[in-house]
Image: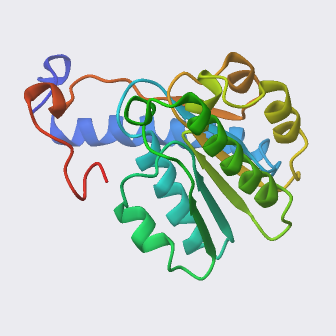
Amino acid sequence: MKDDKYKDFSEEELNARHHEKMAKKKAARDKMLANITAEKGLLMVYTGKGKGKTTAAMGLVTRALGNDFKVGVVQFVKGAWPTGEEKILSVQKNCVFKRMGEGFTWDTQDRQKDMAAADRAWQEAVKMINDPAIDLLLLDELNIVLRYNYLEHDVVQKILANKRATQHIVITGRNAPDWLVEMADLVTECTEVKHPFKAGIKAQKGIEY
C-alpha cells in the first residue's frame, strides 16, 4: 500500500526515489564506519522492568560460542529452577555454566542465606574475570543482588573497572545502579508493554525457563 503522499507516483518513480534514498544512506553509513575502527572488551548491561533481559544475554552467549569464544555464565539469585539454557549451554565444551542462587528473594525470605549465596557466586565471577581464557562472561541477575546490597558496590565496581581489556562482560537484572550504567559501554533497557502473567498465564517451559 502506498503512502498517501506518494499515491500519484508510478512504480518506476517510487523505485527511483527509493534507490536515491538508499544510496545516500549507504554513503553516510560508509563514511561513519570508516571512522569506527576501535575494538575493545565491552561492558554490557541489560536492565529494565520488561521481560527479555536474560533471554537477550543468553542469545549473546550463543553467538559468542558460535564464534569459538570461551564463555562463562554465573547466575545470581536464580537457582531453584533448572532452565533450558542451562541444559544446552552446560554441555558445550567452551562454556562454563554456574547456577549459584538459592532462588528468588521472595521465596527464600532469608537475607543471610541470600547474601551468602551472592558472595559465593561473586567469587566464581571473580575467578572467571581473572581467567585469561574467558572471552565473554555473563553475570545474570547481578543487578538484583546489588540492589539489595548483598555485595559491596565499591568492590564490584573496582573489579569490573579493572577487567582484562579484551574481555566482554554482560550484566542483567532490573534496577542497574547508576554507577554501572555510567561505566558500561552498552545499556539496553527492556520496557514492559504487555505481559502474559497479567492475563493469568503462568510461566511456561521453553519460554520463561
Say which residue appears at 61% left-offset and 38% top-offset: 142
Say which residue appears at 64% left-offset and 76% top-offset: 68
Q: Position of residue 90 (x, y in %)?
A: 51, 73
Give the camera-side residue of 32 and 164. 164
Q: Is residue 91 above or below residue 125?
A: below
Give the camera-side residue of 167 and 207. 207
Could you tell me which quadrant the N terminus lies in? top left
Give the camera-side residue of 122 and 193. 122
**In the figure, is residue 116 to the left or right of 141?**
right
Q: Position of residue 61 (x, y in %)?
A: 55, 60
Say which residue appears at 38% left-offset and 40% top-offset: 52
Could you tell me which quadrant the C terminus lies in? bottom left
Q: Is residue 103 above or below residue 130?
A: above
Q: Position of residue 12 (x, y in %)?
A: 22, 42
- The quarter of the picture where residue 64 lies is bottom right
- The quarter of the picture where residue 43 lies is top right
**In the figure, is residue 128 to the left or right of 194?**
right
Q: Is residue 34 above or below residue 127?
A: above
Say which residue appears at 19% left-offset and 23% top-offset: 6
Q: Is residue 141 above or below residue 81?
A: above
- In this figure, what is the number of numbered marks? 0
**In the figure, is residue 114 to the left or right of 43?**
left
Q: How is the image coloured?
A: rainbow
Give the camera-side residue of 201 and 151. 151
